[in-house]
Structure formats: structure tokens, C-alpha cells
Amino acid sequence: MVKVTVDDIPITVPEGSSVLQACELAGKEIPRFCYHEKLSVAGNCRMCIVEITGSRKPLVSSCSQPVTEGMQVKTDTEIVRAARRSTMELLLINHPLDCPICDQGGECDLQDQAVAYGRSCSRFKDGKRAVTDKYLGPLIRTSMTRCIQCTRCIRFTSEITGTAELGGLNRGTDLEIAPYIEQAMDTELSGNLIDICPVGALTSKPTSFHFRSWELKTTQSIDIHDATGSNILLQIRGNEIMRILPKRNDLVNEQWLSDKGRFSLDGLKKGRLDKPWIRQGKNLIQTSWPEAIEHLGQKLKTVKAERIGAIAGDLCDAESMLSLKILLNQLGCYNIDCRQDGAYYDSSERWRYLFNTTISGIEKADALLIVGSFPRYESPTINARIRKRWLSLTEEFPIAYIGDLPTDPTYKINYLGNDPAIINDLLQGQNAFTDVLVKAKRPMILIGHSILTRNDSPSLFHMLLQLADQIGALNSQWNGVNILHTSASRVAGIDLGLIPDENHLDTHSMIEGNVDLLWLLGADELNLENLPQECFLVYQGHHGEKAAARADIILPAPAYTEKSGIYTNTEGRIQKSFRAIFPLGEAKEEWLSLLEIGRYLNLDMPFIDLDSLRNYMADVNPVYQSLGLMNSEKENFTIEKRKNDFENQRFTSVISDYFLTNSINRASPTMNECSLLRRSSSLKVTE
């Protein structure tokens, strides 16, 4: 620890801290443009100037100056104020006077700091430099004349995304930030450039000129487009979602958000189901909720319980799944499954289907084996965390990869191949990477869904558990077995018992025609071609896709932005989202409509409102007694040894198109444009 004095305030800071960090610990506000705590230090804007008493060079940029023992820092002297005024004046020489039409207005760092630290008027009368705008794809709008060359965007693409698509061209007064090749950005985190840009040079293209920041109200929520559970802010005007931003949570998504989570909001407005429908003959007819409930209730009375089945989709909240399970169990039906993809899970203990190191724990690992997963598509923010650990200078972080490799994973890997036999080689010590894992103090195995959706999934999964046990990845201080889920609802579904036992029907059996009534709760990813026409299909969801077109009755439900719900992410972290706007049309929250159906059937439903449903959820599984992450550390891990009976079949990626993985994405014009651009660029590379 180092003792320093900031404006006569003595403080103690960790050795290696910068002067800027020391000033912030002392409660002093230091202006900055180029400095960002998640990026490397550039020190090129010079706005963070402070005075070091007794130094040969009294004025220094505080972001790049390390603290020393006994250092005395002044943050608000006349010489500091004059230097900041001059720096601001230089930054504004070429900046256009277009604040009234700039989307950054109202939340612009340059605007705020010009008022706080700049001069009241400009002394420059020469013409301003103009820079041509650059094309960065359908998500980022550029106005490069506004750019102040802070280089945050360059460092972000080089360090966080690993794509290094932006750089500085030319020198001196001709310097400009530009892509090396003018094309759509090839990263799943490009929207974060908008957040880190301190001026209006990079703004959101889909929402350009749609609103002003002060018109918006903010609600906290959870991103449901993958299983990471990224914390987000829904910004609304009236009853419309205008913008989605990341909410900082260093334990989950830090301050980043995937492009799907940020830009697919236009899909919330298209293709929506807003009224109940009943099939009469070959046509679907609009109806009222009382008629729909009566029609469905009468049908449920005529079908035997063992001939009823239900499948929960990937975007469901925990309350919806539990209320459907309660309704069916009251009818005597136990054919309910939360796995549209039919994935195999060992649910005997909770740690066997979780990301056990936790997302933030990736930074503690010292070796990584990725098997059957491609984190860049399955969870861009987790992939950024892996890259962050790989770039760390503290110690080496070797990464080995087994499986399909669609594109650059953004970090250096030791590619072992795409053959399940490699797992057996590692287990038998016949692969050199086994020694790397054994020598590691905190080895980590990341298991993807292409491992869990095969016929030989049980064998492969238990082989990986044996490998984890063999390399020392399972102990009371460190659990290195990680399942990377791709569905926001999957962990909660497993927690709440939505996986049938061997005596009841799973997803595959149900859609093959072994039920007379099939209930789809937002299940949009199923192939219903083999479902017999005489099977009565209930669809409860928010987008009218193939399942809704085939349905005999449609119950409209709200999207995740229109209801309060609990979601459990891939590491088992229980988080709550809040309703930002009212449901569209006559859409009704799933738990409420299911409660009304239960009352119509005179069933003994153990809840009467959302609070009592959540209390019952805590009774079903005690981990839901509170929000957050439950401690899953154990003293002893029992690993069963099984026969290594696996198929010689290559792994295939579970995500074929990153931008179109669910009904909201597929309804989004923005996501469809991104998908088309990526597919066309892939074809060009192939040619």
C-alpha cells in the first residue's frame, strides 16, 4: 500500500495505482475522455491533468502517472484549471456545432465537460476540419467529424472483442479513426462502441433521431437472448421500449452487452400475438379470454392426463414454467419438459448442470479446456471474459479446444480437433494437454450443448466429469466443471423439476405423437412435422411463428419487457427483471392465465398472486428463497466411473446463425439485416 495526499486528504492506495484512481478514492472528480477503466491506458486526451507538488514536471496526466510514496496531488489549482481550459479549447477546434441534432446530446461527456471545465467562448475563427463518415454496418452510425481521437473504440476492438477492426489513419491534423476495411463490424459486441464513445461520433443507427435521452424512463431487467443473465436497463417513452443498455454488474456481464440483447428490440413490435385465437375448422378465429379459457378447459376435461404433454421454451421465466407445471400436476399429468433440444442433464446434484467457477471466476482459472462449445456465439460477454483472462499478464492461460470452429474465437487456442475420441485420449493421458491441466492449480472445463444433445451425451458428459476429477478440478476450493447453457430458461426449468423421469414423456416422445394435447409455453424452436393433425395444440407465447400457425388455441403472452419475472443464468445466479411497459393488446401474464384456467377446472392452485407463487417456488426448491448466487461448494464429489461408450461422430455447432436464435430475433428487421450481411460475407470468403 502507498500513502498519498490528494488536496490535503491523506489516503492509502494499492501499489501500482494511478494518480487518477487515487483521486477518485479521495472523492475528487477528474475529467477524462480517453481513460476507461476496462481498457488499457492511452493518455492522449490530457483532460485528466493534475498538479504534483515538488515535481520537476508539475502538470501530469493522472491516468498514466503511477502513485509514489508521499506524493502530494492538487486537483483544483489555478494552473490545473488553466491547463484543462486550454486542453478543452484544443479538443473543440474541429468539433462541429451540431449539438441540437446530435443523438449524444444530453449524455455527452464532451458537452458536459466543456461546460464544467472549458472557456465560455472560443478564440478560434478558422474553418473546421471535415472527415468523411465510415460504414460500420447496420448497427453503428458514424459522424467522424465529431471524433476527438480518444482511441477508446480502437482499444475496445483490439482488447475486448479481439477483432482489431479500427485504427488511426494518417498523422498530425490528418489523423482519423477508421476501419481498415470498410465493412460491417465482425463482432457480437459492437454496440458497446456506442457506450464507450465520449462524443457523438458513434451512435445507434437503428434508433437515430427517435428520441432524446431526457425523454426516457429506465427500468432494470435481465437479457434473455442467452443464458448469461446480463443485467440491462430498459429505457421507455410512453408504452414503448426505445433503447436497451447494459447495467454494470462486474460479477456477470461487467458493463458489456451483446448485440442481440441491445438491438433486437424492434422485434418486440412485430409479429406479436395480442388476442386469443381458437381454431374453427381450418381457420383461426379471434375470441375473448373467457371463451378461450372455457374452450381449453372443456378440452382438458376430455383428455386423459397421461395423454397430455407440455414443453417450455427458451425465453420463459421461472414463474411461468412453475405455474404450468402446477396446473398439469393438478390434472395428474407429469409429461412436462423444458428442453426443446432434448439435451441430457445429470440433475442428481445442482452443480452438475451449472457454470460452477462462476463467470467472474474465469479470471482465477489458469488452464481451460473448451469442449463442444463456441462461446463467441453462445455467450459473447463470457467469451470477452475468457479473452480478458487470456490477455492477463499475471500468469499464462493455456486454452485447448475440441469441437466445431466456425470462426476466430478471438484468443489463441490449441486446437485438438473435432473428434469425441480426443476426450478419451485426455482421460487416458495420451494427449499432451492432459499434463497442462494436471499441472494447473485451477483448471477449468467448459462443456457446450453440442456435447449434451447427442445420442452418446451421458457417456461423454461422465467422461468429462472423470477427467475433471482426475486433473484436480473438483475440490472444496475450486469446481472447474462448467456447463455453458444457451437458453435463458434452462437452469430454472431444471431447478423446478421440468425434466420428466423415465416413466414419463420427454420432448421427442411428445412431438412424435404420443400425446393427444400438447401445450407449448413459448416453445418456438420445435419441428412439428411429425405431430399428428389430430393432436390438439395449445400455444402460449408472444410471437406468431410456425407453432402458433399450427395451434388449435392461442393464448397471447407478454414479452420479457412486459412482465416481472425471475431468471436463473448459466452459473445458477437467480435474478429478477421488472416490467417496463404494459403487455400488448390483450396479452396476459402466463401465471395469471394459468391460474384462471385452474380455477375454471376447480383445481387447488397453491398460489393466488405473483408473490404467493414465488413463495411456493421457494418451497419447491430452497435456492429460490433469495436472489443471487447460492454457494455450491462441496467437500466431496462422487464421480461414477462408466464405460466409455461414445460414437465417432463429429461435434456440430448448436448455433448456426448468431443473430436469429429465437422468435424475437427472427421478428427483428435489424437482426435479419445483420444475419444477411454475415452470411453474404461468409460466402465471399468461401469463394
Image (cartoon, rainbow, N blue to C red):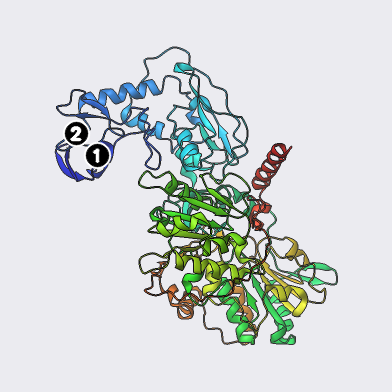
Query: Height in image: 194 above or below 460?
Result: above
Q: Position of residue 92 (x, y in %)?
A: 41, 23
Tag of residue 23 = 1
- Whether residue 186 sits left or right of residue 253 in the image: it is right
- x 50%, y 61%: residue: 429
Residue that label 2 marks: 73
Please name the amino acid that badge 1 sits on.
Cys
Q: Indicate the secondary structure of the residue bearing disc 1.
A: helix
Quadrant of the rendered image containing residue 304: bottom right
Q: Residue at x 50, y 29 (%)?
A: 167
436 vs 412: above or below: below
Instruction: Report whether 295 appears left or right of 645.
Output: right
Looking at the image, residue 32 lies above or below residue 238: above
Q: In this view, does 672 lie to the left or right of 101?
A: right
Q: Which mark is residue 158?
A: none
Percent coordinates x, y for residue 326 in the rendering: 58, 81
Circles 1, 2 touching at the beta carbon (< 8 Å) = yes
Residue 60, image quadrant: top left
Residues packed near mark 2 inside 10 Å, few (<14), some (14 to 19) or many (20 plus)? many
In this view, the residue in front, 80 or 653, is 653
Could you tell me which secondary element the residue under label 2 belongs to? strand
